[in-house]
Image (tube, rainbow, N blue to C red):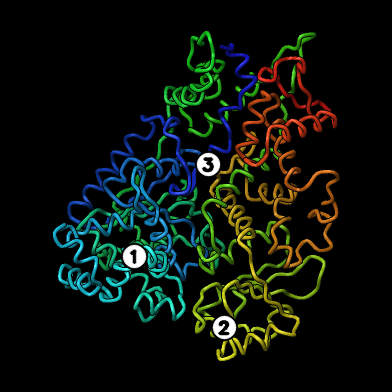
Amino acid sequence: MASIYEIIRQEMNPFDSTTFRPGNFWQEYQDPAFTVESIHQEVIAEVEELLEKVAQDHRTRTLLLAGDSGSGKSYLLGRLKNLLNQKAFFAYIGPWPDSDFIWRHVLRNTVDSLMYAPDGQKESQLLLWLKSLSALRDESIWKQIFSERNLFIRNLKSSYPNGIYNANEFFGVLYALTNSELYPLACEWLKGDDLDEETLKLLKVKRAINSEDMALRIISNFGKISSATQPIVLCFDNLDNIDRAEDGLINLQALFNFNSLLHNQKLKNFLVIISIVTNTWKQNSRRIIQADLARLDKEIRLQSINLDQAEALWKCRMYPIHQKTDPKPRSPIFPLTRKHLEDKFPGGKTRPRYVLMLGRQLFQEAKTQIESPDSKLSLALSQEPLAAFQLLWLKEFSKIQEKIYKVRQFSAPELIQMLREALTALQMHSIQPKLLPSKTYASYSFSYQLPFQKGRIGIVWMEEPNLTSFCHLMRACEKAVKRGLCQNLYLIRGESVGGFGNQGYKIYNQVFVGTRHRHLKPDISSLHYLATYHSLVNAACAGELVIGERTRSLNDLEALTRKSKVLRDCRLLQMLGVFTGSTQLGDTDNNIPELSQPFHDVKEFLLNLVKTQQIIGRQVLCQNARSQFPLVNQFQLAHLIDELCREKQIFILDPNAAVEAQLICLANK
């Protein structure tokens, strides 16, 4: 086996900053090998105790979980889900774009989460919840109930004779969940999608969940029925990017209005966890109505970790490296030392992220102090934020591609928010929300100015398939055009716009056909770009975005996004013309000689990985590239590495060594 020094030079830095930022615990894999059980163990015990109380008396309770940036709040939510998913159903509630839609946002996020299968289970939380209802547990009548819709509904109505909103339709949709063909449609209805008439008929319901009051009542239904099974845990996270109030500060009061209604209307069997940055809470708590603050059952502050726990974090990360070495180092954290921690954190306390960032720095220093056969070669520990950002973007983009498969996974206000954030990063001028003169559809729109063009551009994005709703939207667009609220109006819509017999289609033709206003059809790839950037915005706003050697602000993220040009291939942004005439955004230098775009992406990945690692084993470099680009073979990778060597961007430290022993270094320029 190789020595520890040889392995350190070959391997990736185990303190990869892309692993510092957990997000939605249903979409992020949380490696249990990196978990230190003692960290925040007392908080987990307190949450479990509160959850048990909800399970016993079914009274909804609310917990505020406050912690500094980097203290491990989001990671803790993931641990809670992993540890307690056998005792409760977990929902991750991300930031909402418009407080007028908060109940519908919570419902959508809750059902989205319930559609995930817990670890070790083959079925979704939603089906597990349904099959665990006391009214459906009798196996002797199971097949009979599930073979006949009316019997299923009657059985549930007799078990829940009071308090269920729109019982016939709601229980009918629950029955549709048992049909594999109707399951996705039933989920869409439960999420609040504004479905077309044909789908509503298939589900045997009259209308969609299209108001805050209806969303509240459906959430209440979930709570009342789940009293017979397990509590539902609503985890609110990333609150620094929620809708803002008129004074420009985040509208935290909307969340507390929501929470108070949960309590006042006695919605049963929920545990609400509000995860928030301590400074954000200090700045905004005094603006919350006192009566709403009184609805908090418990407030927990995440404490700093001690140096023993910090050392344990390092041990988790270093363990795979040490397993490959012979002889084994005496210390389980070598080449890191306890003294490094004591010198950096003389008070004996710190936050988990700071420990990981220090570990990354020290490991990188160990990697870059190497000896060549001829002389001592010192590779400077350079700052490569752009390369680190491009690698982070690629990793996040790949995760988004796996999770998002259609545009309608997001509500219209969410789609508008994501597009608005991207345009802000690309320095569009005078972005103003809510263009349409309609309370119902204002959040489906915004306007802005291009930096090289006069006049305002209006954007409207609606994907709900219901053509009656589309007709109302077209009337709002017609009013906006007549009032001169914008000079060019873009309708973004992939769903049908109806036919000649539809009134909405007639208005659509008048406004968008043969005029300067345009209809754009989004592709799923464009949504992947927007959703990737949105996830990074959430992290930056919460102070959780680590790139390279430090935590990055939203302004940093916007600058890196422009410099890296990662949005330039977003087809929707291209159709909107935001890159036209702007050399800054990279339209004029997109001609890549000799290489096709896919191979250029692989070559860029290889170079960025070497930039961030400074020195890396050739085999490890190729393994990472194959993992990111599985269609690329070893011969092609060897060719790209040779090209980078000829361009003097990288070099092989000992080209005569066996391939498995070769080290690739970043060339000093």
Residue 434, above or below 374: below
Q: Is residue 270 left or right of residue 77?
A: left
Mark 1–mark 3 Cα distance, whole angstroms, equals: 38 Å
The mark nearer the N terminus, 3 or 2, is 3
160 relative to 597, above or below: below
Q: Position of residue 185 (x, y in %)?
A: 41, 68
Judging from the image, what secondary structure is the residue with disc 3 in? loop
Amino acid type indicated by mark 3: Arg
Marks 1 & 3, CB-CB < 8 Å contact? no
How many labels, in total?
3
What is the crowding at mark 3: few (fewer than 14 residues within 10 Å), some, or many (at least 20)? some
* Residue identified by numbered label 3: 21
Q: Which residue matches tag 1?
A: 179
Marks 3/2: CA–CA distance: 43 Å
The residue under the point 71% across, 35% down is 606
On the image, numbered disc 2 is attached to which residue? 498
Kind of element beneath mark 2: loop
Number of the front mark, 2 or 1: 1
Of discs 3 and 2, which sits in the foreground? 2
Identify residue type, mark 1.
Answer: Asn
